[in-house]
Image (tube, grey):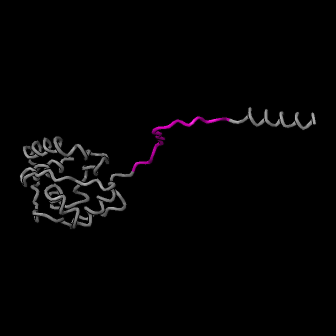
C-alpha cells in the first residue's frame, strides 16, 4: 500500500510541477503580425484607358503643357478633401493616385470624382475597386466640374 501511495504522490508531483498554466484575462485581445502589402496596381482591377465611366464627362482634352495655376487649385482641393482616403504613392483607404492616368482615362477619373455613386453602381472598374478596397465607398464631395478639372490637372503632375 505504501508503494501505491508513493507512486501516486510522485506522479502528482511530476504532473503538477511540469505544467505551465496560462492565465486567461477577459477583454479585448489583439495580435499584430506583419502582413505583406499589395502593390499599387492590383491584379484584380483591370487597367482600361478606353473606359470613360458613368457621368457627365464624355471628353477631356489635356493641353501639352500643364496649367500651373489649375494645378495649384487642384492640389489645394486634393489636400482638403482627398487625402482622408488617398495618398499620392501609397495605398490607403483608396488607391494611390500617382500614375492614375496610366490606369484610367481622364474622363473616368473626372466621372469618379463627380459621380461616385453612379460609377459604383454601373461601372465595372469602379465595382472592382470597391471590392479591392474592402467596400470602402468613395463619397460624393459635390465638386463642380471646374473643381474636378483642377484636381484632374493636379493628378497629371504626380
Taking the image as shown, residue 18 lies to the left or right of residue 8, namely: left
Q: Percent position (x, y) of residue 51?
A: 21, 67
Does the magenta stretch mainly form a helix, a strand or a loop? Answer: loop
For the record, the magenta segment spans: 20-37
Q: For the point 26% across and 67% down, which residue is it?
A: 124
Q: Is residue 24 left or right of residue 143?
A: right
Query: Residue 2's spot in the image, x, y percent?
Result: 93, 33
- Is residue 31 inside the magenta stretch? yes
Label tally:
0
Q: Nearer the viewer, residue 149 or 29?
A: 29
The one nearer the camera, 90 or 134, is 134
Horizontally, residue 134 falls left or right of residue 138, namely: right
Q: Going 44% across and 48% down the picture, which residue do you hit?
A: 36
Residue shown at the point (29%, 46%) measured from the top left: 89
Across and down, in percent, residue 23 comes to 59, 34
Classify the position of the N terminus by image quarter.
top right
Above or below, 32 against 108 in this view is above
**Viewer-side residue, 50 vs 127:** 127
Q: Which residue shows up at 90% across the image and 38% down it?
A: 4
| Residue 30 painted magenta | yes
Please state the horizontal and vertical placement of residue 40, each as a whole percent of the image. Answer: 33, 52
Amino acid at each position: 500500500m505504501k508503494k501505491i501511495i508513493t507512486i501516486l504522490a510522485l506522479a502528482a508531483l511530476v504532473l503538477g510541477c511540469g505544467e505551465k498554466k496560462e492565465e486567461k484575462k477577459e477583454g479585448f485581445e489583439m495580435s499584430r503580425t506583419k502582413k505583406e502589402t499589395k502593390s499599387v496596381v492590383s491584379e484584380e482591377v483591370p487597367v482600361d484607358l478606353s473606359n470613360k465611366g458613368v457621368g457627365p464627362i464624355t471628353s477631356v482634352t489635356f493641353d501639352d503643357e500643364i496649367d500651373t495655376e489649375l494645378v495649384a487649385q487642384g492640389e489645394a482641393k486634393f489636400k482638403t478633401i482627398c487625402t482622408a482616403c488617398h495618398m499620392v504613392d501609397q495605398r490607403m483607404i483608396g488607391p494611390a493616385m500617382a500614375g492614375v492616368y496610366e490606369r484610367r482615362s481622364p474622363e473616368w477619373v473626372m466621372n469618379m470624382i463627380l459621380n461616385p455613386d453612379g460609377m459604383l453602381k454601373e461601372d465595372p472598374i469602379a465595382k472592382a475597386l470597391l471590392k479591392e478596397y474592402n467596400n470602402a465607398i468613395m463619397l460624393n464631395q459635390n465638386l463642380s466640374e471646374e473643381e474636378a478639372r483642377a484636381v484632374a490637372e493636379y493628378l497629371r503632375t504626380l
